Image (cartoon, helix red, strand yellow):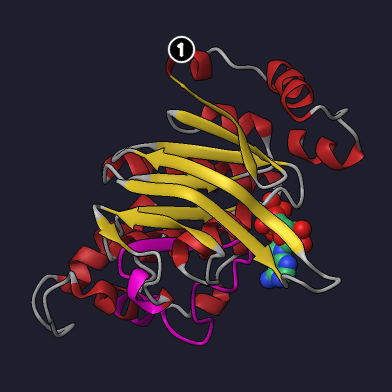
Amino acid sequence: MLDIQNLVKVFYPGTVNETHAINGITLHINKGDVVSLIGSNGSGKSTLFNLISGTFPLTSGRITLDGKDITHQKEYKRAMDIGRVFQDPTKGTAANMSIEDNMIISSKKGMRWPKFSLYKKGVRERFNDMLKEISLDGRLKDNVGLLSGGQRQALTLLMTVMSEPKILLLDEHTAALDPPASDNIMKMTEEIIKERNLTAMMITHNMKFAIEFGNRLIMMDKGRVILDITGEEKRTMTVDKLVELFKHKSNKEFDEDNALLTN
Ligand SMILES: Nc1ncnc2c1ncn2[C@@H]1O[C@H](COP(=O)(O)OP(=O)(O)O)[C@@H](O)[C@H]1O
Ligand SMILES: [Mg+2]
């Protein structure tokens, strides 16, 4: 599905600010994989997503999606196949527009929905049915600005999957929410992924979420993949074991910065 070969990213090469963010990642994500991605601050998680999405050019390496080489494809073109949700709940939706208008815009993205007029029978009902999934049914005419952060993140998630992306990338999309809202969005995320058989990768600094989520867990450190587990090994993982593995694989003590991982 998503194939990443020898990926390297150096920011500001040859300057005093030279940063080696990604140091040779080779990774194959299978169709249907649901991956949690963890790693301490600055380990390169967001940069990996930015390279997959084409936000920045890569330094070297190759990325193919569904057999198609997208290494140098423009970001806006990849956006048809790659859905992204960020940490900030205000980023994915337009506050001064209704839920319905926000959904119309995202349903046009990717052109996977046939050309339609909203007045065509059934579209509004379909939108409202989808909103049931996130408990916002009956609110099509409400302005998005009226929603809580958690509700906005749920709507962003729903809008992102409407265009049927080949892969969904979630970058700490619950981190800005309070714990109950965060738990709630995590549950919705799992349901939405399962319902649509999506392939997804989710960055989280919460080890508990990382262990509970999906079928595969990847840990990064210093721009490399240091752990990649699935199956029984993932199912029997615990936070304590994960902390031990982090120490062992990164040759680092689990310091204050890394403690972020257990939140
Ligand atoms: N746009 C950028 N310009 C320069 N350096 C960057 C940029 N984005 C990330 N970096 C650097 O790359 C490294 C990895 O960052 P990032 O991918 O954001 O880590 P993570 O998401 O794991 O916390 C860090 O050293 C960071 O400072
Ligand atoms: Mg990040």
Question: Measured from the top left, where is residue 167 in percent x and y?
Answer: 36, 53
Question: Measured from the top left, where is residue 236 in percent x and y?
Answer: 55, 12
Q: Is residue 172 above or below residue 180?
A: below
In the image, the segment drawn in magenta is 76-104
Residue 177 visible to the viewer = no
Quadrant holding the C terminus? top right
In the image, is residue 97 part of the stretch drawn in magenta?
Answer: yes
Residue shown at the point (72%, 70%) measured from the top left: 13
- Left or right of 70 on screen, residue 53: right
Q: Which residue is mark 1?
A: 232
Q: Tell how many labels.
A: 1
Residue 145 visible to the viewer = yes
Q: Amino acid at mark 1?
A: Glu
Quadrant of the image occupied by residue 147: bottom right
In the image, is residue 50 part of the stretch drawn in magenta?
Answer: no
Q: Is residue 89 above or below residue 132?
A: below
Quadrant of the image occupied by residue 138: bottom left
- Left or right of 21 on screen, residue 71: left
Quarter of the image where ligand 1 sits = bottom right
Residue positioned most to the front: 14
Q: Nearer the viewer, residue 217 or 141?
A: 217
Question: Measured from the top left, where is residue 39 in percent x and y?
Answer: 69, 40
Residue shown at the point (72%, 45%) measured from the top left: 222
Q: Is residue 85 above or below residue 254?
A: below
Q: Secondary structure at mark 1?
A: helix
Residue shown at the point (52%, 71%) measured from the top left: 57
Residue positioned most to the right: 256
Q: Nearer the viewer, residue 134 or 34?
A: 34
